[in-house]
Image (cartoon, rainbow, N blue to C red):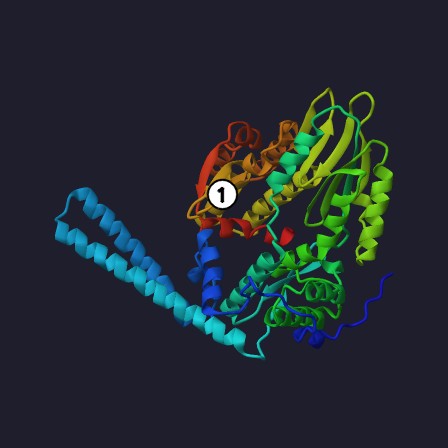
C-alpha cells in the first residue's frame, strides 16, 4: 500500500526552478483567452449557449452573444434568398452591410466577455471551483461550479497552455486501432501484451504530478498556481491527495503529462517492437517469448509512479506456431488471429455497454405511467441513434458516429445478432402496437452492414444521451 503525505499546494504557486518561456505566452490575456474560445467554436460548439447556466453572472454577456448569433443566422439567410431571387443590388447590399455590422458587433461582444474572464483569472484569490455531480460505476464524477462560464474558460486556457508546453496531441482511438490491426494481421511469431492501469485517474498522486510539472520548467507561475489550486479543491472534497477529478477536461491533459515518462521508457526498450497507450489502456508488441518479462516491467514501472496494474484486464498472448492468436480485448474491439486472418469484433464490454444503453432507453420510456407523444418520439430517437449511424449536424468536424462508424474496424459482425435479439425482446413488452411496429424496422445488423444514416442535431444528442449518461 502506497501512503501519500499531504503536499503543501502553496509551494507550487511560486516555483523556484527557472521558467523557460521564450516561445510560449501562457498569460491569461484577452488574446490567449480568445484563442481558447475560437478553438471551441471551430469544433462546432456554440459556447454562447453551452456556457449559460441559470443564475450565472456571465449570462448578460453570453445572452448578447447568443442573440447576435441568431440575428447573424437570419441575416445570412436573407442575403442568400435575395441573391437567389435576383433582388435589386441596393437591397442585397443593404443586407450584406447589416451582416458585416453584426459580425463586427459579435467580435466586440466576445472580446468584452473574454475581458471579463481575464479580469477574474488575474484576481489572486481566483480558483477553479468544482463539486461532485454524480457517481458512475462507484466513482465520483465532478462538474465545474458557478461562475461556470469563467471556470470553463479557465480550464480551456490551462488545457491550451499544457498542450502547447508539452506538445500534447489528443490520441485518436481510430488511429491507434488502425495501427494495431495492421501490425497483428500476419502470422509471424510475436508476444502481445495488453495492460490496464487500475483506477487510473483516482491513483495519480498530487505531489508527483506537481513535481513533474514544476521540474519541466515549461509552465508559467500563473498556470502552475491554478493547477495546484484545482488539485487542492479536489483534495478538500475527496479527502485525498491522490486522484484527478473525473469529468473535468483538464484531468485528461494532466494525466498525459504524468504518463510521458512511462511512454518514453517503453518506446526505448530494445525488446519492444511496438508500444501504444490510450488513457489507461496499453498495448505492447514484443519479440516472441518475451511477453511475461515485458508485462513484469510494466508492473514495476507503474508501481514506481504510484500506479498499479489491473491484473484481471492485463494479459500476454503469444502468436502460436500454427499462426493463431487468442482473443485480445482492446479499445472496444475483440482481436483474434485465426485462419490466417485477423478477426475484429466488438469486445464483451463494448457489447454490454450498448445493451445497457438500449435497456436504459426503454426503462426511461416505461418509467412514465402514461407515455406521452414526446416520450414515444424520444424512444424512437434513442433506438435509431443506437442502431444506425449519424453525422452530427452543426458540427464543423463533420463527426460520424453510430453502430458502424464508431466500430469501423469490425469485420466479424456476428455478435450484433444479440443486440437485435435484445431489441426484439424490449419491443415485445410494448402495449403500443404502432410504436412497436415502427421500432421493429430498426436492426443493428442492418445498420452496420448497410451503413444506414439518420440525422440528429446536437441538441437532440444531448437529450438522447441523458438516458444513459450516468451508466459510464
* Residue located at (53% from left, 71% from top): 146
Whether residue 319 is visible here, answered yes or no, is yes
* Residue with the mark numbered 1: 399
Residue 64 visible here: no
- Image location (x, y in percent) of residue 91: 15, 53
Quadrant of residue 332 within the rendered picture: top right
Callout 1: SS: loop
Query: Which residue lies at the image location 52% right of the left edge and 72% below the top edge?
Result: 147
- What residue is rendered at 45% in x and 58% in y? 38
x then y, percent, for residue 369: 54, 52
Which quarter of the figure is the N terminus placed in?
bottom right
In this rendering, would 311 be left or right of 161? right
Q: Nearer the viewer, residue 51 or 461?
A: 51
Taking depth in this image into account, of 443 and 280 the one nearest to the observer is 280
- At label 1, counting other C-alpha atoms closer than 10 Å, the crowd grade (few under 14, some 14-19, many 20 or more) is few
Query: Which residue occupies the foreground of this view, 337 or 418?
Result: 337
Left or right? Give the position of 423 relative to 314.
left
- As rendered, which of 255 and 414 lies closer to the eye? 255
* Count of labels in the image: 1
Residue 404 percent across, percent down from the top left:
56, 34
Quarter of the rendering containing residue 359: top right
Q: What is the x, y in percent for residue 425? A: 61, 35
Residue drawn at x 54%, y 79% as measured from the top left:
123
Amino acid at each position: 500500500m502506497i501512503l501519500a503525505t499531504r503536499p503543501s499546494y502553496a509551494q507550487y504557486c511560486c516555483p523556484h526552478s527557472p521558467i523557460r518561456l521564450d516561445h510560449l505566452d501562457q498569460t491569461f490575456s484577452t488574446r490567449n483567452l480568445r484563442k481558447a474560445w475560437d478553438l471551441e467554436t471551430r469544433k462546432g460548439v456554440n459556447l454562447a449557449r453551452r456556457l449559460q447556466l441559470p443564475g450565472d453572472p456571465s449570462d448578460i454577456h453570453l445572452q448578447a452573444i447568443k442573440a447576435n448569433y441568431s440575428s447573424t443566422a437570419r441575416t445570412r439567410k436573407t442575403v442568400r434568398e435575395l441573391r437567389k431571387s435576383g433582388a435589386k443590388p441596393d437591397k442585397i447590399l443593404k443586407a450584406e452591410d447589416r451582416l458585416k455590422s453584426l459580425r463586427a458587433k459579435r467580435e466586440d461582444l466576445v472580446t468584452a466577455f473574454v475581458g471579463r474572464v481575464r479580469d477574474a483569472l488575474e484576481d489572486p484569490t481566483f480558483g477553479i471551483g468544482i463539486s461532485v455531480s454524480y457517481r458512475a460505476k462507484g466513482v465520483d464524477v465532478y462538474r465545474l461550479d458557478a461562475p461556470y462560464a469563467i471556470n470553463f474558460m479557465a480550464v480551456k486556457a490551462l488545457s491550451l497552455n499544457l498542450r502547447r508546453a508539452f506538445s500534447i496531441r489528443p490520441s485518436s482511438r481510430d488511429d491507434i486501432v488502425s495501427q494495431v490491426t495492421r501490425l497483428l494481421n500476419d502470422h509471424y511469431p510475436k508476444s502481445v501484451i495488453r495492460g490496464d492501469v487500475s483506477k487510473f485517474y483516482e491513483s495519480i498522486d498530487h505531489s508527483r504530478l506537481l513535481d513533474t510539472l514544476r521540474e519541466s520548467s515549461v509552465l508559467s507561475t500563473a498556470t502552475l498556481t491554478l493547477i495546484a489550486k484545482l488539485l487542492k479543491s479536489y483534495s478538500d472534497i475527496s479527502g485525498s491527495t491522490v486522484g484527478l477529478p473525473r469529468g473535468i477536461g483538464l484531468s485528461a491533459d494532466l494525466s498525459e503529462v504524468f504518463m510521458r515518462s512511462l511512454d518514453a521508457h517503453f518506446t526505448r526498450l530494445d525488446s519492444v517492437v511496438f508500444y501504444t497507450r490510450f488513457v489507461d489502456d496499453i498495448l505492447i508488441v514484443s519479440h516472441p517469448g518475451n511477453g511475461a518479462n515485458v508485462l513484469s516491467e510494466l508492473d514495476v514501472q507503474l508501481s514506481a509512479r504510484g500506479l498499479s496494474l489491473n491484473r484481471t484486464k492485463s494479459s500476454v498472448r503469444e502468436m502460436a506456431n500454427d499462426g493463431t492468436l487468442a482473443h485480445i480485448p482492446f479499445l472496444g474491439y475483440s482481436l483474434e488471429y485465426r485462419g490466417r486472418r485477423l478477426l475484429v469484433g466488438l469486445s464483451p464490454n463494448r457489447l454490454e455497454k450498448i445493451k445497457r444503453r438500449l435497456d436504459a432507453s426503454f426503462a426511461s420510456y416505461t418509467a412514465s405511467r402514461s407515455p406521452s407523444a414526446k416520450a414515444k418520439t424520444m424512444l424512437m430517437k434513442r433506438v435509431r441513434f443506437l442502431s444506425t449511424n449519424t453525422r452530427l449536424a452543426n458540427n464543423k468536424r463533420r463527426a460520424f458516429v453510430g453502430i458502424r462508424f464508431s466500430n469501423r474496424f469490425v469485420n466479424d459482425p456476428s455478435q450484433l445478432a444479440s443486440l437485435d435479439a435484445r431489441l426484439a425482446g424490449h419491443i415485445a413488452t410494448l402495449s403500443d402496437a404502432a410504436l412497436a411496429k415502427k421500432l421493429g424496422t430498426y436492426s443493428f445488423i442492418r445498420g452496420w452492414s448497410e451503413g444506414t444514416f439518420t440525422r440528429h442535431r446536437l441538441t437532440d444528442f444531448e437529450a438522447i444521451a441523458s438516458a444513459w449518461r450516468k451508466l459510464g
